[in-house]
Amino acid sequence: MPEGDTVWRAARLLDRELSGEVLERTDFRVPQHATADLSGGTVAETVSRGKHLLTRIDHDGAAWTLHTHLKMEGAWRVLEPGRRWPRPTHQARVVLEVPGRVAVGFSLGIVELFPREREDDVVGHLGPDLLGPDWDEDEALRRLLAEPDRPVVEALLDQRNLAGIGNMYAAELCFTHGVHPATPMGAVAQPERLVRRARQMLQLNKERAVQSTTGNLRERERMWVYRRDRSPCRRCGTPVAVAMRGSQGRERASYWCPVCQPEPA
């Protein structure tokens, strides 16, 4: 699933290419909005909220919000009209056309269109956004520590605590902080450093298409442990371990070094 910095870049792309433009054509290829037509409306802006994208459109005196979520496979692309799409047509879920450009949302996990005053119903539950103007370190810490017995990796992934961390950053943060993913949140030393490093990682990566937590952008050298199962730890040489964690239907792979991140007693 895309991380918060990937979604931030998608929002910036849509905001740069569409904001202030009049929609010549809209096509919502999902059953609940198949008949909706916002052509003639003006795109006000697109913002990210954690892993959510909010495209605000003014149409016939009404303020609308197009809410999209990339989930596992989604992506937004902005193309010249008539240019061949980079993905199959059947994967398109939203098409927004303005003069000289067409934005296509492929394989979007969520597509919702609703009056703008309902935005808080959709994203109001999210914690402070690591890349947003509402970032509040103290509030993020308060939420993370509210359940001290919860495994740190689960607490980091819960978007209600802080918004923007996915499986990759959760694994990398646990490694760089030297804690096993199953360590209870309340037993994590200096949790404020963990939160600051989370924000730092996303801030450093938000401007580049290739994510790295090691500082090395070469393939297979970009991560400390994520998707490096059975490869040697970059610090001690011990093979990186991997295990599926979480409840049925929501399992995720956790990666860690058994030596650098010893399992809690």
Image (cartoon, rainbow, N blue to C red):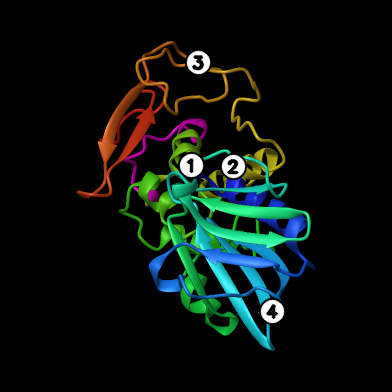
The residue indicated by pointer 2 is 85
Q: Between disc 4 and disc 2, whose residue precedes?
A: 4
Three-letter code, disc 2: Trp
| Structural distance between the alpha carbons of marks 3 and 1 | 39 Å
Which residue appears at 70% of the width and 50% of the height?
Answer: 81
- The residue where tag 3 is placed is 234
Helix, strand or loop for disc 1:
loop
Q: Residue furthest front?
A: 82
33 magenta-colored = no
**Mark 3 → mark 4, Cα distance in angstroms:** 51 Å
Contact check, label 4 and label 2, Cβ < 8 Å: no
User: In x, y percent, where is residue 96?
Assistant: 63, 61
* 69 or 129, nearer to the observer: 69
Q: Residues within 10 Å of mark 1 (few under 14, many from 20)?
A: few
Which residue is the site of mark 1? 88
> On the rendered structure, is 29 left or right of 26?
left
Whole-Å distance between the Cαs marked 1 and 2? Answer: 7 Å
Q: Residue at x 45, y 36 (%)?
A: 174
User: Which labelled disc corresponds to residue 58?
Assistant: 4
- At label 1, the amino acid type is Pro
Where is 174 relative to 46, above or below?
A: above
Query: In the figure, 188 relative to 47: above or below?
Result: above
Q: Is residue 184 magenta?
A: yes
Q: Position of residue 70 (x, y in %)?
A: 49, 52
**Mark toward the start of the polypeptide (3 vs 4):** 4
Gap in angstroms between the C-alphas marked 2 and 3: 40 Å
Q: Are marks 1 and 2 in contact (CB under 8 Å)?
A: yes
The residue shown at (48%, 41%) is: 88
Which quadrant holds the N terminus? Answer: top left
Q: Which residues are magenta?
A: 175-185
Residue mark closest to the camera, 3 vs 4: 4
What is the three-letter code of the residue carrying label 4? Asp
